[in-house]
Image: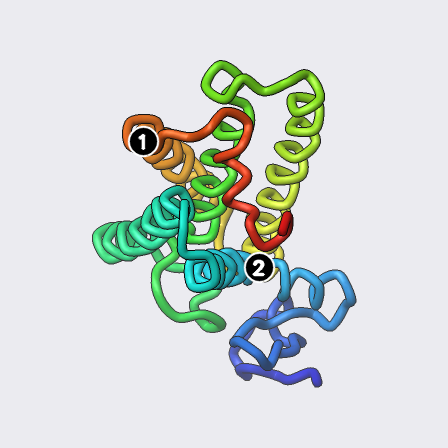
Amino acid sequence: VRLNLNKNMTDETADLARFDMFYIVHNGTFLQQFLCLVTMMPLWILAYLLAVLMIYKKQQKRNFLLLMALLSSVAFNKILKRTICHPRPYSQLYHGHGMPSDHAQFMCLWAGYLHQLLSHCQRFNWSKFHRSQHRIYIATIWLWSALVIYSRYALLFHTIPQLICGAIIGLVLSKLWYEIDQRFIADPVNGGPYLLFSMFIE
């Protein structure tokens, strides 16, 4: 259903439709409706981690650590937004502040953490087969993260500088949290990192 959200809107934003599950506006094309689902990826990641922690009781230190990293990132982002007070590009559509982008920060933290985990050959003694597989996994993770970040721009949530700022913060946080991972989580060779994907491999 298309709706005119505000009589005073510019031509660019006047003829938009609302995605009913959450408040997201789009132009009615299949691509933007797809992006409405893509843009909620952080919720799907958090739901997955919570489900894994509830279903599997043992050897879930890394899932718990990643969940804490992502939740703390969300809290840190809220503090930054209230401190910087930079508006969203279309404040008539979406309330709140836009700098830095929470989704860009979240996805770059998630992707950066998994990238380090799957590429740390010396730590886990990955075989050549695992290394070749992991290159595909890493590329897929980054491409999907880039699509989520793009969705925030395409759906008018953020400006490019807001997305870049969020992405940089997320990358820095991924480095810090992976350092914590290395210090406090001891894994069996070639096994431990795959516990992040418990629900897919059992």
* Residue 66 horizontal/vertical position (percent): 39, 45
State the image quarter where residue 186 is shown.
top left
Q: Amino acid at mark 2?
A: Thr
Q: Which mark is residue 176?
A: 1
Of the pair 109 and 54, the residue shown nearer to us? 54
- 184 sits left or right of 57 in the view: left
- The spot of residue 161 in percent (x, y) is 45, 42
Q: Position of residue 131 (x, y in %)?
A: 65, 21
* N-term-proximal mark, 2 vs 1: 2
Real-space Cα separation, disc 2 to disc 1, in angstroms: 25 Å
Callout 1, which amino acid? Leu
Q: Nearer the viewer, residue 193 or 106?
A: 193
Q: Which residue is mark 2?
A: 39
Number of other residues with Cα within 10 Å of mark 2, as a class: few under 14, some 14 to 19, many 20 or more: many
Colour scheme in the image?
rainbow
Can I make out residue 20 in this image? yes
